Image (spheres, rainbow, N blue to C red):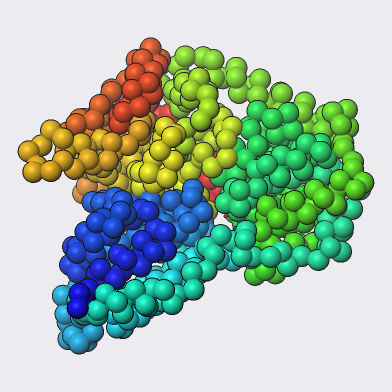
Amino acid sequence: MEEIDGNILVAMSLAKFGIRHMFGVVGIPVTSLANRAVSLGIRFIAFHNEQSAGYAASAYGFLTGSPGVLLTVSGPGCVHGLAGLSNAMANTWPMIMISGSCDQNDVGRGDFQELDQIEAVKPFSKVSLKATHITEIPNCLSKVLNSAASGRPGGCYLDLPSDVLHQRISKEEAETLLQNIQTQNNNPSDSTLPLTTSHEISEAVSLLRHAERPLIVFGKGAAYARAEDTLKKLVESTGIPFLPTPLGKGLLPDTHHLAATAARSLAIGKCDVALVIGARLNWLLHFGESPKWSNDVKFILVDISQEEIQLRKPHLGLVGDAKQIVETLNKEIKDDPFCLGKSHTWVEAISKKVKDNVNKMEAQLVKDVVPFNFLTPMRIIRDAIVALGSPAPIVVSEGANTMDVGRSVLIQTEPRTRLDAGTWGTMGVGLGYCIAAAVASPDRLVVAVEGDSGFGFSAIEVELVPLSYDALTFAQTLVRYQLAVVVIVFNNGGVYGGDRRSPEEIDGPHKDDPAPTSFVPNAGYHALIEAFGGKGYLVGTPEELKNALSEAFSARKPAVINVIIDPYAGAESGRLQHKN
Ligand code: ADP
């Protein structure tokens, strides 16, 4: 009778549950698991560091709506992976981390890479399970996958001790185990019925209808729910101005006539009713409090999480899937339609402010400043991205100044085409996100616009982007992974900028060291990708940048464009100076 081991059963289970990609780092005791998964048709994206692989898995969950899967080795591998798992939790994105762990018989004896991994992952996961016997593998895997994607999405963990991976059962028994698993529907919009009552829906519509200055705010929860079409209908049928959060950008185009992004302070400062859909009233939205918001604004919160609504205590809470709730709101409005119209005082005020602010910004942007500030290269990048048309590239952005300036200048026109440091302000996500985006959306170009500091966290992962082993003398050709990713590094020589200390500030026993904020000036980041067979560009003028972008975008080949920025151009802590 044919027998299989735990590694094969994990791979069979992953394939059965529809997993198509895995991110991770192999080693003891999970190498065979990864190989088995590959032989069953799962694409394994092998990273250098579990941290980046974990960031990739978290973003993959957001982009595809199915949990991203991270595979790590035991002990330190699991600890490195916590960066990704916690990032998924903070952003409410579905992912699972699977880690090998030491032999159960050696626990407590100082085994190789021993760690109580279940305890370690607890603060960062919705559910954490250990398969203590091979027969538990399919059920445990099904449970973590389902919990990651159900209700409020998040990270879940599965622990696979090495003895369990080596246990054997008959193939027949394995197949029976798999057949017995009730494969639940992973899609929250199908599995989660709105908990909201029709009375609450009517109340929400009545609040919007009678508001003098209504505003619709939407965030990455609405993006995750694929609510773009229904949101467009809501906005356009009611004529209510809208404001996306950074990762909500693109659900409706930034260029839409009701977009209030360029009039953000006015919109949130003066609105009297705010319908907030799939976005938390956390630091990104100033906790929904004055002075940024008016004291008497009435919030209507739409969120899949009842807990979130209870925490914020809005005027009205609608618990459920964003797409379903907005559809219900649209139906209710259809029976008795209302629309503010272009000449409504509030709509006019927002639209005027948007025009004024856009004009002010454009006046800054048109100037070609050399050595580069942040605005000149950002305008050139914006124009090159706009020229690409549809499908729009996925823009990955991180770094304090680069991300802040990019958020205002770059234009998002399609949903889920922006990834950035997110709820946790996590820096170092860039390369992992790029790789996840390229894998999840192969039809789109991926353009990373990052500061040199953000890039440096995981810069070695550029090796994954271009490498084709074609040129190497392998018995069989492996293609690693040839992703259409162009990374643009805003190189201002450090965190926030280069060494900007005045001579008086430089004293003490370590006075010859560079400032803690500074890196090697004019570092040759473009050479990194060349070391792996990709294309690198070093640019310092508008012409050089335009040429590099044009060549890299049309080639759709991996590239790093190293843009030298004036080391004095960035502000410390970007736009969050009050928190420093
Ligand atoms: P942003 O950073 O864009 O402001 P947040 O991450 O703060 O967004 O908020 C996203 C919210 O969306 C979370 O509170 C999460 O519970 C919620 N959410 C996740 N999925 C859905 C969904 N399908 N429908 C409605 N809300 C959702």
Give the tally of numbered discs: 0
Nearer the observer, 291 or 171: 171
Pick out the residue farthest to the front: 1
Q: Is residue 80 left or right of residue 59?
A: left
At which x and y percent is residue 533?
A: 19, 31
Pick out the residue farthest to the top: 543
Q: Is residue 509 visible?
A: yes
Q: Quadrant of residue 245?
A: top right
Q: Is residue 290 left or right of residue 54?
A: right
Quarter of image, ligand 1? bottom right
Nearer the observer, 102 or 169: 169
Q: Is residue 309 above or below residue 566?
A: below
At which x and y percent is residue 108?
A: 22, 87
Q: Quadrant of residue 152?
A: bottom right
Q: Is residue 371 visible?
A: no
Q: Is residue 212 above or below residue 303?
A: above
Q: Residue at x 68, y 52 (%)?
A: 323
Q: Quadrant of the N terminus?
A: bottom left
Q: Is residue 189 left or right of residue 49?
A: right
Q: Is residue 21 above or below residue 441?
A: below
Nearer the observer, 427 or 520: 427
Q: Is residue 394 above or below residue 223?
A: above
Q: Residue at x 19, y 69 (%)?
A: 29
Q: Residue at x 82, y 50 (%)?
A: 331
At which x and y percent is residue 523?
A: 25, 31
Q: Residue at x 45, y 59 (%)?
A: 67
